[in-house]
Amino acid sequence: ALGLYDPQEFYPQYAGSLYDWNQFYPRIVAGIREVDAETPILVSAMGWGAVDWLPVLQPVDAPRLVYMVHQYEPQDQYTHQEPPAGNTYPGRFDLDWDGSPDTFDRAWLDGYLSVVDDFRHEHGAPVSVNEFGVMRWVPNAADFMRDEMELFEQRGMNHALWVWDPAWQPWVGQVNDFTFRFGPDPRSAAEVDSDLQNVIKEFWSRNKVRPSTLYP
């Protein structure tokens, strides 16, 4: 509603106000902990939990608190390209809106995630990814996904892939941008094998703890 998508623009004007998540979420945490000391609490920053907003999230002293980020960057230029998608991975295109092309590759992703490293180092707090993904038709989506998931794993970050896949078939047949099982063809609404799916399944196969192992 405020039209501010950069924390450096938001906080000089609204820090401590009713718009500021930092003055609100600690009270929620305190309320939960009054009645429940065990259940983990997941907390994201403002800005849809974007990595860029993590540094301005003010941690609270509470047990079993995990800070979360959503990672879709570079969203407009790559992960959310509508077909026909032109930008590829790795590639060169304008990533910072200055009119000049930048290199988009594993090193860029690693550098972008250094924001998480800094937050964890400063606060000694766990950080996980509870949303990430890529539209299934973007060029070299599998390579992008492999590098990103490897970088999460190297950091010891739990991660949850965004799969908008409800049971209501009329929706699934029309809104399936992230349904990786449908392959890279935007027209597809049926399950096919794909490089992107194989990468995701490869990483999922590393899981050692599953509901089936906890509740056989």
Image (cartoon, rainbow, N blue to C red):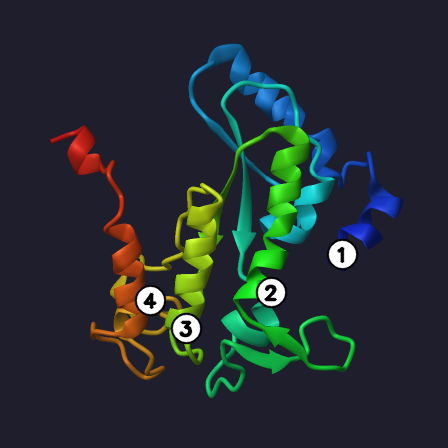
Quarter of the image that includes the C terminus: top left
Q: Amino acid at mark 2?
A: Trp
Q: Position of residue 11 (x, y in %)?
A: 82, 45
Q: Nearer the viewer, mark 4 or mark 2?
A: 2
Identify the residue under disc 3: 141
Identify the residue under disc 1: 6
Q: Residue at x 23, y 51 (%)?
A: 205
- How far is the residue under mark 3 from the one under mark 4? 13 Å
Q: Nearer the viewer, mark 2 or mark 3?
A: 2
- Is 19 on the left-hand or right-hand side of 196? right
Q: Label 3's element?
A: helix
Q: Amino acid at mark 1?
A: Asp
Q: Label 1's element?
A: loop
For label 1, the crowd category at 10 Å Cα-Cα, with few meaning under 14, some 14 to 19 and many 20 or more, is few
- 76 to 30, vertically: above or below: below
Q: Residue at x 61, y 28 (%)?
A: 124
Q: Nearer the viewer, mark 1 or mark 2?
A: 2
Asked whether 104 or 2 is in front, the reply is 104
Q: Residue at x 46, y 59 (%)?
A: 148
Number of numbered labels in the structure image: 4
- Image quarter of residue 100: bottom right
- How far is the residue under mark 1 from the one under mark 2? 20 Å
Q: Position of residue 162 (x, y in %)?
A: 41, 56
Residue 179, which numbered label? 4
Residue 196, which numbered label? none
Q: Position of residue 145 (x, y in %)?
A: 41, 64
- 110 to 75, vertically: above or below: above
- Is 9 on the left-hand or right-hand side of 176? right
Residue 108, which numbered label? 2
Whichever of callouts 2 and 3 sits on the residue coming sooner in the sequence is: 2
